[in-house]
Every structure is written in C-alpha cells, then in structure tokens.
Amino acid sequence: MRIGGGDPLEFIDYIRENQDVFLRLLSEHVQLTLLSVLIGIAIALPLAVLASRIDLLAKPLTWVAAIGQTVPSLAVLALMLPFLGIGFRPSLFALTIRAILPIFLNAYVGIRSTDRAVVDAAQGMGTNGAQLLLMVELPLATPVIFAGIQTATVQNIGLATLAAYIGGGGLGDWILQGLAMVDYPVLLAGAVPVALLAITAEVTMGGVRRLVVPEGIR
Amino acid sequence: MITLEGVSKVFTSHGQQVCAVDDVSFDVAEGELVVLIGPSGSGKTTTMRMINRLETISSGRIMVNGRDLRSLDVVELRRGIGYVIQQGGLFPHFTVADNVSVVPRLLGWSGDRRRQRAHELLDLVGLPPDRFADRYPRQLSGGQQQRVGVARALAADPPIILMDEPFGAVDPITRKQLQRELRRIQAAVQKTIVFVTHDIGEAFLLGDRIVLMSDGRVVQDATPADLLRHPADPFVTAFIGEDRGVRSLQFTLLGEIAEPGPADTRANGVALPGSLTIIEAARELGKRGPGAGAGFWISDEEDQPTGYLSYQRFAAVLGDTIAGDHTAEHASEGTDGIPH
C-alpha cells in the first residue's frame, strides 16, 4: 500500500509506465463527452426551437428536461442496465440525457429573450418564420446557446468518470481502481487528467465562442 | 391609398374583452402624411399595426389600393410597407448597410444592387456611407440609429411607410433635427405615411392631416390648421393646449402662406427658406434688420424663389395670431391681394 508519504507526483510515473492504457482511457473519455454533447445538441436545439414556437410545448418540454437533469446519473445507469446492458452505449445514453437540459434551457431562453423590438421590426419587414429564426433569433441567441453547450461539455467531462461503474471506460477506470485499492497515484492518474481536460475544454470553447458569436454583439 | 372602414380591435385580457380600437374609419391619400395622435392607450399604435397586419382586425376592413388586406399574402404585404419603430429595432449583428438592406435581401436583390441602394439611402438620411456603412448599430448614437431605421424603411422603395413614434426615444434637440430631416425627405420621396406620435408639436410639424384618437375612437380628423381653428370638442382643445395661437405660429411654414410675387423685384431683397416656421422667420428677419423693398422672397431647397410675402402681410399673420382669435391662415385672408 502506498498511502501518503510518497512523492505526490508519483502518478505521473504511473501514467508514463501505462501510457497505452492511459491513451485508451483518455480517448474513451473524450469520445463519451464529445458524442454525448453532440447528440445532446442534435436533440436539444430542435426541441428548443419547437418550444419557442409552440407555447403549449414549452412547459412540458422544460419539465422533462429538468427531470432528466435531476435524476442522478448513476440511477440512470442502473435503470437502463436491463435495457442497454453495460459498456459504452448505456454510458453514452446517460451522459446524453444530462447534456440535453443545459443546452435546451439555454437555447430556449436565448431564443425567447431576443429583443422584442428587433423581432417586431423583423416581422414588420416581412420575414417569414424560418427567416426570423435564422436571420435574427438564432444569431442573437448564440452567446446564450453556446454557454449552454459549454456548461454541458464541462459537466459531462466530470460525469463521464461514472461510466467506469458499468464498464463504459474512460479515465474513471483508474479513479475507481485507485479508490478501491486506496492507491493514490492510480487515483490521481485518473483524476488529474479529468480536471485538466475540463479546464482545457473551458478555455478552448471560450476561444471558439469568440468565433461563433456574430461581430455586432460581441 | 389606404382606407380604414369601421375597424375595431378587441383583445381578451384576463377573460375580459377590451376594445382597443373602436369603429375607426379614415383615408390616407397617396403621398399624404397622416399623423395618428392621442394619449397612451388611445389605440393609435394598434390602429397602425393593423395596416401591416402585425395586429389582426376584429371587425371592419382595411383596403390598400382598393384591395382588402386580408386577401393579400401577409409576408408580401409587409415587404411592400416600410416600417419604423421607436426603439429602432435594428439588427445588432448586422452592419448599418446590411440593416438597410434587409427587405431588399428578403426580396432577393443581388449583393451589388443592395449595397448601392444602401449607400444611396445612407446619403439621403445624412449618414455618409464611407463612414457609416460598415459600422454596427451599437457604435451609433440613438439619433443615428433612427436615421438608419428610416433608411431601412425606404430601402425597397415601398409606396407606404408606417412610423411608430420613430423619434420618441431620442433627445429633444436630435428629435427636432430628425423631424426636419423627415420633412425634407418626404418632400423628396412623397411616400404615403402613417405616423404615430403622442407629441402634438410633432403632429403639427409633420402632418398633412391629423387623426386625433381617444379611447380607441377617432375624435377628430382634420388638417393641422382646421384642428387649431375648429377643435371638435373640449378634449381636442385640451389636448392641443391652451396657447393655440402661438402654437400655430410654431407649426405654420412660410412656404404655406407664400404668394406669387411681383416679377420685377426678383433680383434683390431678402430671401428666406420656405421650410422656416413663422416664428423662426420673424426671428431671422429681426436679426437681419429691415431689407430693401416691401417684402421678402421665399425660396425652396435649391434657393430658387417660389413665392413672396410682403412685410405688411407677414405682420398681419403674426399679429392676428398672437392676438389669439385667429390662426395664421385665417388672418391672412383679409390682406389678400396686397403683395406690396
């Protein structure tokens, strides 16, 4: 057992010694996060547009999204076990559910809070529904929509560690292993890269955001 | 050009039926600027918004060029009607030139044609395109944004323009300037304009006709001069204000009371632009001191003489109006035919 005492940077040696495994776990982790966020966008954005267009749908959709957010991810994993089994796919499923809410809510609020005067002017000039959405509402909502995607990404980098519980892979494997064996270097070899990944994602997306947001509202 | 026939608008609010516009009828002739005025809640904005169908009509009908609005495609209709609103409503993520080009873009004009048109219009509203075309709205002052709003409404050369308190959110000095500019632009483009305001001064300055509304109804529909001379009831009088005589001086333009002048005196003498109000003209004459001759010339924008006014008649207009009982036009009738 290696508790305390030892070199706190010992985990770096562990990563170096197990480079192949590390790269596999890292790649699984990134895939879980990216795929869950991309699928989340593909589901949440159209739903948000729908909710912004049809008032009756707005409340139920918001509720469903909120429920998705409040059910603990571990519970989703457990609940889905009989249907999806174990491994990568059920992990992706659980993470996707968690990605939907922040993206949906931000997109819905972003579209709905477009300056009423701008929308009124656009309608008064004869934009049809699609033009209003594509020319005015979505571009003006990009900062808020993007913030939602950023939140979902950083959150899912953390949540993806739970995939290890059902054999979904990712850096959570080492964290679980380190916890189970009270082996801090192994634990840190999983946890530190996850933290760095989250920080990297936050910073990178901050840069991307500047490219995505239209110039006039930056 | 635009005809409203018994138009009403009923809203349902908290289960209660509220009649925002009640049996309103009036016409707007081609090239005419009609001001809808009234206190807030009088239904003037709702009335205007029914013309481009941003509000649906509950009963009655609106005809544009003899065709019932409801028979027209709503998107097509709106692209054919310029629209200017109080808060500007410029697209913050579009440059000034792109903002001006929104309707041309919706109509599928080519990029070159759009740009050329945008530059023309920016020139027209006094924003040099080489300085302003590529700016974003947030880089403009409120007054400049409203100018862009006016240019945008003119972009596809629509015959009709609706203006909803377009100068209500800018400071008084800029407002005055914008009002004068609009008068100049309107003289050049001759659009059919429905203009909503709650500022009676603005109504007198800009309106060919004023439709005064209260509680969703039309209280009086008259020219500015008639509104002053013959207010329909105490509400009108109260709304216009007590100092009617002085007001009429502020809003009567020299050009409106000019007469054909004697041909031989054209060469010399004082000339004043016809766009001055009577009060401004009096101030201007005071500054210059009495000129040669018995009157002065009234000139148009190109400095060409368009009419003549004798000092005698000018004094009569001023004096009679300040005395209170008559308006400028009224008083002048008695001194007709004495240009010298």
Image: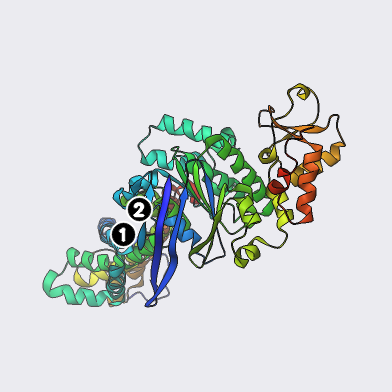
Q: Are marks 2 and 1 in contact (CB under 8 Å)?
A: yes
> In this picture, is B170 found above or below B290?
below
Q: Which residue is mark 2?
A: A133
**In-image side of B258 versus B64 (left or right):** right
Instruction: Report whether mark 2 lies on the same chain as mark 1.
Output: yes
Picture quadrant where residue B159 is located: top left
In the rendered structure, find residue A49 and report the number of the disc placed on it.
1
Give neighbour class at mark 1: few <14, some 14-19, many 20+ (Cα, 10 Å).
some
Frontmost residue, A73 versus B15: B15
Instruction: Please name the amino acid that badge 1 sits on.
Output: Val
Q: Disc 2 versus disc 1: distance between alpha carbons?
A: 8 Å
**In-image side of B176 versus B211 (left or right):** right
Picture quadrant where residue B181 is located: top right
Q: What chain does badge 1 belong to?
A: A
Give neighbour class at mark 2: few <14, some 14-19, many 20+ (Cα, 10 Å).
some
> In this picture, is B24 found above or below B186?
below
Measuring from the top left, give residue A25's x and y in whole percent. Answer: 26, 60
Picture quadrant where residue A45 is located: bottom left
Measuring from the top left, give residue B49's x and y in whole percent. Answer: 43, 56
